[in-house]
């Protein structure tokens, strides 16, 4: 099908859905059983102020590794990327529709909440998210979520709970400053975070939000003076600004964030004198020594191919592609309904991230969180948290 633009977003979505509903069913890729085609829904560096290479590089490496071993049940994998801006709902829907019209076997991304989950429901095509979920965690009772969506990690609320518990219980924080970007995902998350802080016995010392492309956060950072710890939830580049400007202004307290801290460390965006206070949380442990052979092989290959160290974003996305490939092997089918059923029930082992992936009721597939200290200049595990699977 060709892609048509419309002056009205509502008309655009309605027209596209109507056109596709007649052409496809919930079996998605079944129209071409021998073909495995993946749609990648993320940006790469240069396409926005916060875009990174990690998702694309991890996915490409997985596809190349699978194809080098003969593909999946003899079928090679192909892919196409649709640059998707998670902060722009209209552009996001446009790109998702453009991708799903091609009837891919599976889609990957976008990296945060999407306003297009109903669109995925119309197509029924498996989607592997590449970052934590909140409102779109699957629930049979919520019509705004799709049975087709999975995430090979814990939910976003699990990350913030782990960070808050660590700050309160291990670091002794009681007055927690809260900084976050003002996009819809992090505004929604903020409601949950403030409830979690209260339940943990902490108070919100000060809360400030700002645009995803902010480059000077002096006023917001200075508002944190007097806090016992700072919790940052937002995008990569503003996170680096927060960390560096806190150090520049003599705010010497722990700064805790989730997966976005890892790429800004690998990109060298955190000043050396600022690292001592930084803690990050991720479901993927690819740092340090004594790693499993599967993990070390991935790290060596990634550096050989791309000339840089892999981040956990790349590893998580690599695992996501491998999980879908294994589901196709398990079922012997590229039908969406069969893949989804297998993703719901199967166990996936020998991952790069060290996780055993098994979907819970919300379709979160990993239930471990590693909290790292960045004080040494590279992530070092200081606590491992086991998340109770949703039942």
Image (tube, rainbow, N blue to C red):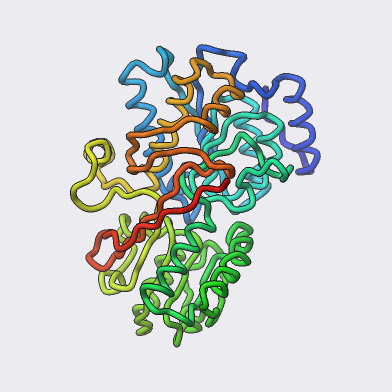
Q: Name the outermost residue toward the bottom.
A: 226
Q: Could you say which is closer to the camera, residue 107 or residue 296?
A: 296
Q: Going by the image, does 37 lie left or right of 381?
A: right
- Expressed as whole percent of the image width and height from the top left, the position of residue 65 reads 32, 26
Number of numbered discs = 0
Report the quarter where the N terminus lies.
top right
Q: Going by the image, does 314 lie left or right of 308?
A: right
- Expressed as whole percent of the image width and height from the top left, the position of residue 250 reads 35, 84
Residue 78 in which image quadrant: top left
> Which residue lies at the image location 31% right of the left edge and 19% below the top edge?
69
On screen, residue 108 above or below 156: above
- Expressed as whole percent of the image width and height from the top left, the position of residue 119 reads 69, 37
On screen, residue 342 above or below 365: above
Q: Could you say which is closer to the camera, residue 45 or residue 75?
A: 75
> Which residue lies at the image location 26% right of the left edge and 68% below the top edge?
375
| Residue 192 visible | yes
On screen, residue 382 above or below 289: below
- Expressed as whole percent of the image width and height from the top left, the position of residue 332 reads 49, 15
Q: Going by the image, does 176 lie left or right of 369?
A: right
On screen, residue 34 above or below 86: above
> Which residue lies at the image location 34% right of the left edge and 15% below the top edge?
70
| Residue 109 visible | no
Residue 244 in which image quadrant: bottom left
């Amino acid at each position: 099908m060709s892609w048509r633009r419309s002056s009205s977003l509502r008309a655009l979505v309605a027209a596209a859905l109507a056109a596709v509903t007649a052409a496809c069913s919930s079996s998605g890729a079944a129209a071409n059983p021998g073909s495995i085609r993946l749609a990648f829904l993320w940006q790469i560096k240069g396409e926005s102020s916060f875009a990174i290479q990690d998702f694309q590089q991890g996915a490409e490496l997985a596809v190349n590794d699978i194809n080098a071993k003969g593909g999946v049940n003899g079928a090679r994998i192909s892919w196409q990327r649709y640059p998707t801006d998670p902060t722009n709902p209209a552009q996001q829907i446009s790109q998702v529709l453009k991708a799903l019209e091609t009837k891919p076997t599976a889609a990957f991304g976008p990296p945060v909440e999407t306003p297009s989950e109903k669109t995925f429901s119309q197509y029924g095509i498996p989607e592997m998210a590449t970052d934590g979920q909140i409102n779109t965690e699957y629930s049979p009772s919520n019509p705004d979520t799709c049975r087709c969506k999975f995430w090979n990690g814990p939910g976003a609320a699990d990350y913030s709970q782990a960070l808050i518990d660590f700050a309160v219980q291990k670091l002794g924080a009681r007055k927690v400053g809260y900084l976050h970007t003002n996009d819809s995902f992090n505004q929604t998350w903020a409601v949950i975070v403030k409830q979690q802080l209260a339940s943990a016995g902490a108070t919100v010392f000060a809360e400030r939000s700002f645009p995803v492309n902010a480059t000077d956060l002096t006023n917001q950072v200075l508002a944190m003076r007097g806090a016992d710890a700072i919790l940052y939830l937002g995008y990569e580049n503003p996170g680096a600004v927060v960390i560096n400007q806190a150090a520049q202004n003599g705010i010497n307290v722990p700064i805790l964030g989730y997966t976005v801290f890892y790429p800004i460390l690998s990109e060298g965006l955190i000043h050396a004198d600022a690292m001592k206070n930084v803690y990050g949380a991720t479901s993927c442990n690819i740092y340090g020594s004594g790693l499993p052979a599967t993990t070390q092989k991935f790290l060596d290959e990634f550096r050989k191919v791309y000339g840089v160290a892999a981040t956990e974003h790349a590893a998580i996305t690599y695992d996501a592609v491998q999980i879908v490939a294994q589901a196709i092997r398990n079922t012997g089918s590229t039908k969406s309904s069969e893949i989804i059923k297998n993703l719901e029930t199967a166990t996936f082992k020998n991952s790069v991230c060290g996780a055993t992936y098994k979907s819970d009721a919300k379709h979160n597939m990993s239930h471990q969180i590693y909290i790292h200290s960045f004080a040494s200049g590279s992530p070092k595990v200081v606590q491992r948290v086991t998340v109770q699977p949703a039942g």
